[in-house]
Image (tube, grey):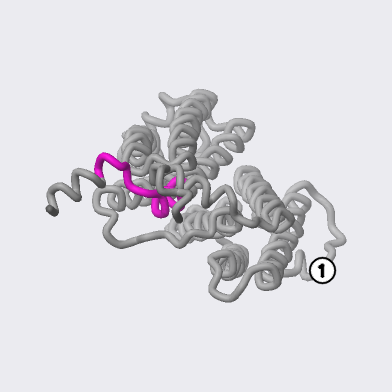
Amino acid sequence: MAEYSSLPLEGIFYMNTRSLSVPNGFTWFAWGVLVFTLAVILWGDVVQATGSGNGCGAHWPTCQGALIPKGSGLAQFIEFFHRITSGLSVLLVLGLLVWSRRAFPRGHLVRLGAALALFFIFTESLVGAGLVLFRLVAHDASAARAIVGPIHFLNTLLLVATITLTAWWSMRPQKPILRGQGGLGWALGLGIAGIVVVCISGAITALGDTLFPVHNTAQAIGQALTPGQHFLVRLRIYHPFIAITVSLYTVLAAGFIANLRPSPDTRRLARLTAVVFVAQLLMGFINIKAAVPLWTQLPHLLLSDLVWITWVLLTASALVAPKRLGVSAAAAGEAG
């Protein structure tokens, strides 16, 4: 440790993380699995937006009672293609777990991340199967669908988070420190909770826009304020306000977090968080202005996932980064 004695704590942290032996093949594979998973998620949005969830009938895992359906039609193609890509995603995550056990020792964080990813992709499949088997698809506007849909989205967020962390931990395997984080822990936790709330409200809003389409914002507000309207119509106007509030918080909190834990990774991720959140707000405005067509829904959903990914990475980075030296010195002086 003598060679590090003249370096600031941040420099030691940076040298240690950059000098790690990284299995590059596994890391690239993990990021590739994440990209493929995001593509499957986007196609799932196509399924809902086009009302194709009933394209294979009330059959699962078969389509119209067959492994390879003989019928035709756009709705069937969209739903069947989603099932094929979802199945490939399961195989990729399974491969991620097998590879993690071959490449990393017992107790390594990568093994934990890959195991959790496999768990959440199976629960993702089960929730998707429930939507089909109970016919909570296509034009169904029941309260059950409004509940199961956000649960599905929450599970998707957990799946994306675990795959992201698996890739990240293969490069930065430091165990996160959860205790004694003080204000930093609260800032990160509130950010996670806020993004989850935005995503759930977004899922409810997207369902309402699919089932009760409008031509412009004024029409959407007018319907929402009209007594006796469906609850999905009334709820969808709240999402933009929730998104703006959470975005302002996270941009400010990212700067606060980078100041408390000023490692190179945390600083870069804090800046990226701000950029992605601003882009998401702009895309959300375009989405509303254009009356939520599919060509704006898809980038809006993708940016939502990227917002979640950047905050997960910022959290992972901040929970292992050293405290700002000035804060540490002040704390030591108070203790003395």
Between 144 and 270, the residue placed more toward the observer is: 270
Between 329 and 270, the residue placed more toward the observer is: 329
Q: Which residues are magenta?
A: 314-327
- Furthest residue in direction front, as rendered: 2
Q: Amino acid at mark 1?
A: Leu
Please say if 113 is above or below 248. Answer: below
* 291 lies left or right of 28: left
- Furthest residue in direction right, as rendered: 70
Q: How many dots with numbers?
A: 1
- Residue 270, position in %: x, y? 43, 37
For label 1, count other residues whose C-alpha is less than 10 Å away and answer few (under 14), some (14-19) or many (20+): few
Is 184 colored magenta in this rendering? Answer: no
Please say if 212 is above or below 13. Answer: above
- Residue 63, position in %: x, y? 76, 64
Residue drawn at 42 percent across, 43 percent down: 7
* 3 lies left or right of 182: right
Q: Quadrant of the N terminus?
A: bottom left
Between 229 and 287, the residue placed more toward the observer is: 287
Disc 1, SS:
loop
Please say if 205 is above or below 55. Answer: above
Residue 114 in sight from this viewpoint: yes
Residue drawn at 19 percent across, 48 percent down: 331
- Residue 198, position in %: x, y? 40, 44
Task: Give the residue number, with chain letter if any, for mark 1.
Answer: 67
Residue 238 in sight from this viewpoint: no
Residue drawn at 64 percent across, 45 percent down: 42
The quarter holding residue 172 reads bottom right
- Residue 129, position in %: x, y? 62, 67
